[in-house]
Image (tube, rainbow, N blue to C red):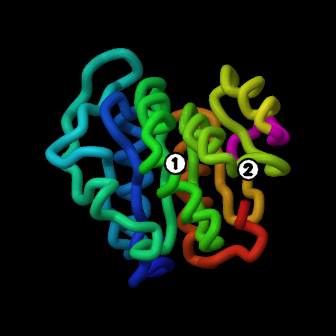
Amino acid sequence: MAGHIENRRVAILATHGVEQVELDEPRRALEEAGATVALVAPEGGAIQAFNHLDRGDERPVDLTLDEGKAEDFDALVLPGGVANPDFLRTDERATRFVRDFFALEKPVGVICHGPWTLIEAGVVRGRTLTSWPSLRTDLENAGANWVDEEVVVDAGLVSSRKPDDLPAFCAKIVEEFAEGRHSRQAA
């Protein structure tokens, strides 16, 4: 994968409760492919990651939502974990940050419970995506077409269901992020 996305800046939006592997594996894959990756969070310092329900490691925040702007990045990753997207979807700065990526037609990768933030940002209507199965009703109620597949791509929006899907998810975000803007991405 190395060399595919050199000179690309990717934001990973996360906060406390993020599923550690869903933050770490995409970051590793993107950096190995040449991207510069920044962890953006509501507050500075560090966020507490989890391994399912067990406390994992802390991850240092690179930029706060007050500092990071969608214009400064080429793509966005939204990892899951149950608490992480639930916290983010209640923060207007986070939902605005997400909406801005769609408005700018920039690619977005989302996995597991991450689509909760997309729903709150109002960017899933008419889109086909997947997620952790318990989000199916939420996504359908928001106007999305939910499918049960390892990885789904819809005009620059890449989605996967769970940590077991990470190899396919990571490969696909590198590919989509290398393609750049997608004219059908705007919500």
Mark closest to the chain's N terminus, 2 or 1: 1
Residue drawn 35% across and 28% down?
17
Quick one: SS at disc 1?
helix
Is mark 2 in CB contact (under 8 Å) with mark 1?
Answer: no
Compared across the picture, whether 147 is left or right of 165 comes to: right
List x then y, in percent, for residue 30: 42, 64
Residue 6 against residue 104 in the figure, above or below? below
Question: Which quarter of the picture shows residue 143?
Answer: top right
Question: Which quarter of the picture shows residue 83?
Answer: top left
View extreme (front): residue: 92
List x then y, in percent, for residue 181: 64, 77
| Label 2 Cα neighbours within 10 Å, binned few <14 / some 14-19 / many ≥20 | many
List x then y, in percent, for residue 50: 32, 27
Q: Which mark is residue 106?
A: none
User: Residue 30 colored magenta?
Assistant: no
Quick one: SS at disc 2?
strand
What's the distance in space between the residues labelled 2 and 1, CA to CA?
22 Å
View extreme (top): residue: 53
* Residue linked to disc 1: 95
Residue drawn 71% across and 66% down?
186
Amino acid type at mark 2 = Val
Residue drawn 80% across and 41% down?
144
Q: Which residues are magenta?
A: 143-152
Residue 122 against residue 8 in the figure, above or below? above
View extreme (left): residue: 45
* Residue linked to disc 2: 152
Q: Is residue 171 visible?
A: yes
Mark nearer the viewer, 2 or 1: 1
Image quarter where the C terminus lies is bottom right
Residue drawn 42% across and 60% down?
29
